[in-house]
Every structure is written in C-alpha cells, then in structure tokens.
Image (cartoon, coloured by chain):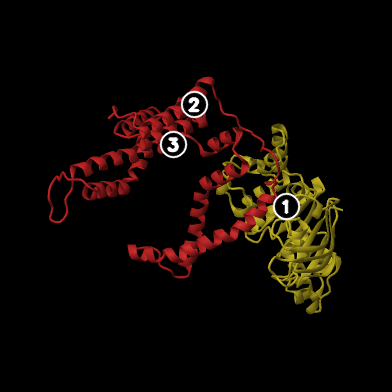
Amino acid sequence: MSLVLAGVRYRYAGSRTDALHGIDLEVPSGSVTGLVGPNEAGKSTICLAAAGLAPATIGGHLEGVVSIDGVESSSARPHELAQRCGILFQNPATQLSGTAPTVWEEVAFGPRNLALPGDDVVERVTDALAALGIESLAERDPTRLSGGQAQLVALAGILALRPALVILDEPTSQLDPQGTRMVGEALRRLVRENRTAILVVEHKTALLDQLADRVAVVDQGRLIREGPTDEVLSDPALSEHGVEPPPRVRVRSALAGAGLRTPREADVLIAELTR
Amino acid sequence: MPTGAYRRLNPATKLALALAEAVLALGVRGWSGPLVVIAVCVGVTIAARIARRSVLLVLASIPLLVSIVLVNTFLYPGATDPIVQLGPVRPTWTGLAAAVQATLRVVAFGFSVVVLILTTEPDHLIADLERRGLGRRAAFVVGATLRAIPRTTQRAGQITEAQRARALDTEGRLWRRVRGILPLAGPLVFGALTDVEEQTMALEARAFSAPGRRTVLRVFPDSATQRVVRWAALLGALALLASSIAGVLEAIP
C-alpha cells in the first residue's frame, strides 16, 4: 500500500477547529484515487497531510497515522519523504524552481538536491521526461511554456525523485481542455507503466471518470463516501456535497428521466460521446 | 556557447575582474581609478563586440549623473571659487571637479557591471559559484532573483489585462498610467506573497532541504593563468583601496 491515512485529524496553526476529522483512506500501488468535494471541504488539507508537509513544513497539529510507502511521515524528514511521495499543486508557475534556464535543468533540480551522482541525475531526468512524453521540451525555457506544458514539467520534476506515490491537488484547474487532456494522458501512462499510486483532487469529474479507480467524497473535513469510481460518481447524492456528476452520468440520468432505458451498449456509447 | 576570448573566460574570473574594477572605480581616490576602469571596460566591450549595448545600458544612469552634477556643482560645501553668479545660486569650480569625478566613478562602476552582465550567463555564474562551494540557499536566492523579472513581468501583464477587462484605463496620458499603477501593484505584491507558501512547499517536495552539496552538472573551463588573474585582480584592487585609504597614493592624481 503506497498511502495509508488512519484516523487523521489535523488542525492548522492558529486555528481553533480541526480541518480534518478522522480521515481513513488507502491508495494502493498502480491505482488512482480521486478526491472530490465542495470548496473548503478539506481536500487540499488531506493532500498536505498525506504528503507529510502538514505539519512538518506548514506547522499545525496532526493526530493519527500517515504512512507513505511503508514509512510513517512523522518519523521521516522532508527530503526523505520527497523520495517517497511527490506533490503537485494547482498553479504551474509556483511549482517550478524559477532558477533553471531549460526544462532539462528544471527537472534535474530535485535529483541534484539529493546530491546524486551526475550519471544518475541524467538517467532520472531522461526517464521522467520520457514517462510524460515531453522529451521535446528539454531545451525550452521553463518560463515560456503553456500552462499544460508547465504542469507536465512540474510533474516531471516530481517524478525525477522516483516517488511511489504522487499527490495532485487540482492539477488541471488552470488548464484549458488540451492541457487537461495532456495531464490526464500522462497520469494514465504513469500508472500503467510505473505502477505509481496517485491521489488526485479534481473538480473535473469527467476526468476522474476516465482516470480514477476509486473516488472519495470529502465534505467539512470528513470522508463521506469512498468506493469504485462508477459507483460513487453515479450516486444521486453526490450533488448534495457540491460535486457535479460527470457528463456520462448526467446523460444517463436525463435519459432515465425521459423514460428511456440505458442498456450496456448505450452506456458505452455515452462514455464515447462524453469522453 | 559564448564566443570571443573574454566571453570564454571562466565565470568566476569575470566576476573577480568586475569586483576588482568596481573597487577601483569607487574606492580609489583621485581620477586614475575610474579612468583606468573605463579604459579597460571600453577595450573589453569593443573586443567582445558589446560596445553598443554597453553604452546603451550605461546611459540608463543619466538621471543619476545629472543629479550628481547639479548637486555637486551648485551645493558643494565650503567651495569658494565661483564659476559665475546666477542670482542666489553660485556654481563652483571645486564642485564641478567633484561632480565630474563622481560621474566618472558611476560610469566606471556601471561599465564594470554591464561588462559582467553582457558577457556572462547568470546560470553559468551561479553554477560555477555553486561548484566552488556557494550554499544551495544562496545560489537559489541569486538564481531566483535573476529569473524573477520575466515571471513578474508576465504576471503584471495578466493583472493589467484583468484590470482592463474591468474597464480600468491604463493607457494614454501619463496621469492615467500613474493612476493605473495602484490596482496593478496591489494584486502583484499580494499575489507574490500568497505564492510564497506554495513555492516553499513545492521546494520541500523536491528535496530542497536535503543535506550536503548539490550535484554539479556543469564544469566550466578554468586554468592556472585564470586563477592567478583572479587572485591578482582581487588582491591588487584591495591593496590599492587600502593604500588609497591610508593616503599612500597621494602621488597618483
């Protein structure tokens, strides 16, 4: 199991109330778990706790167990956790180091921090760029990339540390449809080829519908529901928690509302049309 | 890769020469220091084919130079040798001489900086200094600062577009542009501060706090001659500075 959260409660520094109330969540290797919920539900806080950044980097108080790739985050230092778990935030601009003249050197930033031998750094950068299919960007200036490209470069920078778990906090929120598609395809490839475990916060349920194996619903700092993607995203109660069902589910509901049955072939057709 | 003999020098050599020139320009009394530095820098800019760009950059200091000339010429304390009496104001020869000397110092210093900037890639300089033991935090601060300009410009452009979309007039006459600065500066500064926390976490997620020295990937050509030049330039400049302060160089104009 790449990520285990057991009874996690977290309170931000200076706050009087808990942001998370006893979260239990597991993300197995080679799988994608989606996190959905309304704004301020605690999704990003779960990401920070899961990555070991809360409380190690941002302070606050955490109870419960966060285990990343078999190691409890409370017993590991940030740079040790970085090799087990990578985290990507929404804004590509803040993910890049801002010190590298080329994409290649930007991706090498993490491995260089670990003081790895030069050959290892080269190998890791080459692999990370290849894993996301962005080798052609290697010589580009990181500040002159599109949003989708910058997000992929930031993800490559994380992958170069070879973590078993990757956490993505709304990675496509600032991307156009093409950028979203690029990130989605890259994540699929990552799971398929590297058996990486992925926890992704995403408002675009259409993307989760195609990407995630399981989905967890969070509201007011509590895990409301967790299960297979199709089951959770088809739940009519989803909208009560501020989550828009994916187009496939909405079309199916509309057909059902009009008295039309949706046999399996129709489901496949709907999935194709809404992809 | 850079072409030309001066550009091909090791980045640390060019930094040492620039530092030595700056010390000579600003620290050594009299006319000789700034004049020698200007002569050397002009020679380098011609050899490195950056003379035109260098002059343009040095010209950016004109507002500062004008203020230096005016303040010194008209308000030099204790000067009693008037050039001419213009009503209540009285420019003096002593003040004018001090103004010209100060102007030469600023121009010489400006040239030393400009030569370094135009002949050295900032990334090369940081990489070389890192290899020589510059700490990762110091290297990051310098590198991020040098590369912050395009990012800030891009962000300012985005904010300006957003403000224009809300009917804020940021073009046209000067006062309109000035009026548009506040709505631009606020989001720019606060946005940058908000980004800091996320950037800090992103750095932690990339093992920035790992112990030890970072891997060095680029090694720039160096030589025994350049090592000698570096030490000679720095020590020579410091010796001249010390001599100047001690009053040993009175014979040199």
Give the label, 1 or 3, closer to the camera.
3
From the viewer's perspective, is residue B98 above or below residue B231?
below
Q: In the rendering, at what x and y percent does residue B51 appear?
A: 36, 34
Using the image, name the chain to which the residue with label 2 belongs.
Answer: B
Local secondary structure at mark 2: helix
Using the image, name the chain to which the residue with label 1 belongs.
Answer: A
Using the image, name the chain to which the residue with label 3 belongs.
Answer: B
Could you say which chain is coloured red in the image?
A: B
**Colour in which the image shows chain A:** yellow
* Residue type, label 3: Leu
Residue ranking furthest to the top: B225
Q: Tell me the residue at 76%/74% (across/down).
A: A241
Q: How many marks on residues?
A: 3
Image side of residue B138 versus residue B87, left or right = right
**Are the numbered discs 2 and 3 placed on the same chain, yes or no?**
yes
* Residue type, label 1: Glu
Q: Tell me the residue at 47%/70% (across/down).
A: B166
* Residue type, label 2: Trp
User: Which residue is tagged 3?
Assistant: B118
From the viewer's perspective, is residue B174 above or below residue A190?
below
Q: In the rendering, at what x and y percent does residue A3 appear?
A: 83, 55
Residue B49 in view? no
Q: CA distance from mark 2 to mark 3?
A: 22 Å
Local secondary structure at mark 3: helix
**Are the numbered discs 1 and 2 placed on the same chain, yes or no?**
no
Image side of residue A104 versus residue A242, left or right = left
Q: CA distance from mark 1 to mark 2?
A: 55 Å
User: Which residue is tagged 2?
Assistant: B231
